[in-house]
Amino acid sequence: MKQKIFAIITILLFTTGAYAQDHRFDPPWNQVPEGGVYFTVPGIDNAPDLYGDIIDPQLVIFFAGNQFMVIDSLIHDFKKAYPQYQRVFAETLPPGILAKQIISGSLVMGNLKIDIRPDIYTAGKTRIDQLKDSFSIVKNYAGNKLAIMVRKGNPKQIKGLSDLAAANIKVSMPNPEWEGIGKRIEEAYVKADGDALQQAIMKTKVKQGTTWLTKIHHRETPMRILYNQSDAGPVWYTEAYYQQMLKHPIDLVPIPEKHNIYASYWAGILKSAPHKQAATDFLNFMLSEKGQAIYRHFGFTPPEI
């Protein structure tokens, strides 16, 4: 009798999603640094968007958060090409947060205060233009487009952006106040089905609780979908593609060109950069064939010509 009860409970746990917080899909999804005491507690002590050597770095890069997947290869190969730079620190937080960090001079995460000056800042064109007086040089290095991330098998049979307005679809949506992609997705909603679709997803469904506004979509949206908290989320194509590269149970729903929004990514060397030569070398590496091959590998499109 006890064995039957245990079997029933086990089945219920799996079918009701009680394992939703077992953290099996939690980041870090990047390569963990070697050496030192490894202490990461998923959901408690975990900082997947801070990388490398924060003490006396020779180069500091603030990357737009959606490019976290390129960090391992890009920095590893840069160090091989330029062996004089071995202590590199990078952040992959939302570009709006990184911009505020540049302006304020520091970032507070939990009990940690990070007072560090970046050499390079990367973001979309709009954000770069907002800080244009801060840069000595700016270069376009990659592009992207939107897609819809869903669970493997697409159980809700989502075919396009218009389907996200349905009452039974739980949407994970970047908050436009925090993340530049949010505004771009809103543009795509209008292109797909007019202002009514944008209002339905961003007003009505937010009030109903069926649109979840993220603060860091490149982490929240995949995790919410993987843990059955959301059914779908508009993301950059490369983010859904990367989850598939990780063999996570994710599918990608393409958005037609007529409804899609295309992004161009730009890197700027700060006039206040503490390591100007290292910043110049890294920007050159990003634009080199090796650097561009890394971006192509992860699904990014080439820079504008």
Image (tube, rainbow, N blue to C red):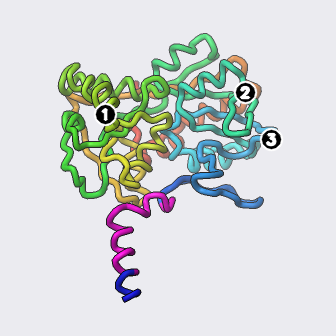
Q: Quick one: 94 or 137, which is closer to the camera?
A: 94
Crowding near the residue tagged with mark 1, few <14, some 14–19, many ≥20 C-alpha atoms within 10 Å: few
Q: Position of residue 86 (x, y in %)?
A: 74, 46
Q: Earlier in the sequence, mark 3 or mark 1?
A: 3
- Identified by mark 1, the residue type is Gln
* Residue plotted at (39% across, 28% down): 182
Q: Are marks 3 and 2 in contact (CB under 8 Å)?
A: no
Q: Which dot marks residue 226?
A: none
The residue that disc 2 covers is: 117
Q: Marks 3 and 1, Cα distance to the nearest angstrom?
A: 46 Å
- Identified by mark 2, the residue type is Arg
Q: Are marks 3 and 1 in contact (CB under 8 Å)?
A: no
Read off the magenta span: 6-24
Q: Which dot marks residue 55?
A: 3
* Residue plotted at (69% across, 43% down): 82
User: From the viewer's perspective, is 155 left or right of 80?
Assistant: left
Query: Magenta stretch mostly in which secondary structure?
Result: helix
Q: Secondary structure at mark 2?
A: loop
User: From the viewer's perspective, is 232 left or right of 129?
Assistant: left
